[in-house]
Image (cartoon, helix red, strand yellow):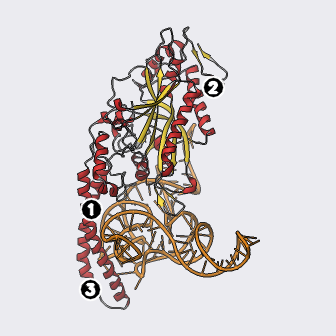
Amino acid sequence: MTLARRMHILGNQTVGPAYHSVQQTGISMLDIKFIRENPDLVKTAVANKNEKADIDHILTLDQRRREIIGEVESLKAARNRATGEIAHKKKAGERADDAIAQMKEVSLKIGQLDEQLREVEADLHTAMSWVPNIPHQSVPVGKDESANQVVREWGTIPKPNFKVLPHWEIGARLGILDIEAATRVSGAGFYILKGLGSRLERALVNFMLDMHTTDGYTEVSVPHLVTEDTMYGTGQLPKLDDDMYRERNDGPYLIPTAEVPITNMFKGQILDHADLPIYLVGHTPCYRREAGSAGKDTRGMIRVHQFSKVEMVKIVRPETGYDELESLVAQAEKVLQGLELPYRVSALATGDLSFAAAKCYDLELWAAGVERYLEISSVSIFEDFQARRMNCRYRDEDRTVKFPYTLNGSGLALARLIPAILENYQNEDGTVTIPERLVPYMGGIGKIG
RNA sequence: GGAGAGGUGGCUGAGUGGUCGAAAGCGGCGGUCUCGAAAACCGUUGUACGUGUGAGCGUACCCUGGGUUCGAAUCCCAGCCUCUCCGCCA
């Protein structure tokens, strides 16, 4: 299931905290000016994404905000002038009782207006935080995944002349996957890999990290616990609150993907244009409550609360953004091609697109045992949506400060990749062949069983 | 966990209630000089919001959030973070 679908299931939204540390007047996710000038375009985007942000309410608050600012700032200007005069008089040894008394009144009024402004801005910010990113014009319009478009397929789907066992069965028989033990330890929705199964996961991680770092990505090892405003920065909050684990009530969150800590490394920073593009790759566990998906994919390791994933992140100049998206997809595909696993690439429809994404490709690979396509990678571009939320900028050659584009893509998710290998590389005698490129990473072992 | 010190512009670092968005230096940018470069010298150099067609004008920002005051980088309170020492520990 995509992030988008998971979010739709969540439904009821509660108003989250104010995310003060990132909050800045006027900057939220979309530029308030953009909403002001293109209300209909934004409304259409909200509808196409099956979201329900109230744009008219935002416009009203924005109008009110500017009215108050006009009023309070002229009062402040007057006060600043008077204050300068008072200072002058005091210095000259004169009294300034009248002016001080007068300014006392003015300051009181300013305090009241500031309070009103604070409230309006808090409301505005909350409302803005629920406005999703606008889909790119190339994204197919459609209410759900049925409108997704397959853009290409690679490899041929094998048609074995024997019954391929689902991964949980072959895994159990080979003694490399122990779902029961995982349930004993942690409850439903976990997996334990043993022996060559665990070795296989490690081999895959190393294979992928080696490939990506060879291709110019810098490997990072990041925290799995992050603050609330970090979650806000990449767009998980406020919307996905119910789908994430959290340490107590106001403690840090467990990351649902390495995208979160890696992208937020640049939160609040002004990068130099020479630093761009930034390519990073990291391997972390991903923790997901999977709230709302109870009863789906209950068997095996397809849908679990914790899984391992290699994630790629890019921070790039806006003008290169969509080229970077294509090369990022290609990078994820390269892993599957290296493992000789057949897959297809789909462009997600507007209704299947995640809250923060402008465009997204899913890589789905065929799993012979469960006889269906599994989403193994999601490659997205967020344009400047995340950069705005994080307040991450870069200084361009002309010295102006701009928002970069951010992208990320799985490269890849282990809890989908391992089942695919166990099923697609399964032999009639119940053994599993190791993909050729992986054999060196398996210490020369070419077959399990 | 205990005890101290501290968080100022891209960086270093002054500033302890009043024309302070903030000295100075470094760095950056522009210029003079040069065949070119370095050095030297001169000039310039924050971000956001509001307003205006525009030059501009106004407001806010010295970790964050409150408070005191006619007026806060400067005083008070809370929080976050950093550093040093002690203790504990993978």
Q: Nearer the viewer, residue A168 or B40?
A: B40
Q: Which residue is mark 2?
A: A437
- Tell me, yes or no, whether the two marked residues, 3 and 1, touch with CB atoms within 8 Å: no
Amino acid on which the number 1 mark rests in the picture: Arg
**Mark 3 and mark 2: span between their CA atoms?**
85 Å
Q: Which residue is mark 3?
A: A97
Q: Are marks 3 and 2 on the same chain?
A: yes
Q: Chain of mark 3?
A: A
Task: Compare marks 1 and 2 and give the one earlier in the sequence.
Answer: 1
The number of numbered discs placed on residues in the rendered structure image is 3
Task: Compare marks 3 and 1 and give the one earlier in the sequence.
Answer: 1
Q: Nearer the viewer, residue A348 or B43?
A: A348
Disc 2 secondary structure class: helix
At label 3, counting other C-alpha atoms closer than 10 Å, the crowd grade (few under 14, some 14-19, many 20 or more) is few
Residue A156 % position (x, y): 52, 21
Q: Chain of mark 2?
A: A
Residue A22 % position (x, y): 40, 54
Hey, which quadrant is residue A256 in on the image?
top left
Amino acid on which the number 2 mark rests in the picture: Arg
Q: Which residue is mark 1?
A: A65
Q: Nearer the viewer, residue A209 or B75?
A: A209
In screen coordinates, is A128 left or right of A308? left
Disc 1 secondary structure class: helix
Looking at the rendered image, the quarter that the N terminus of chain A falls into is: top left
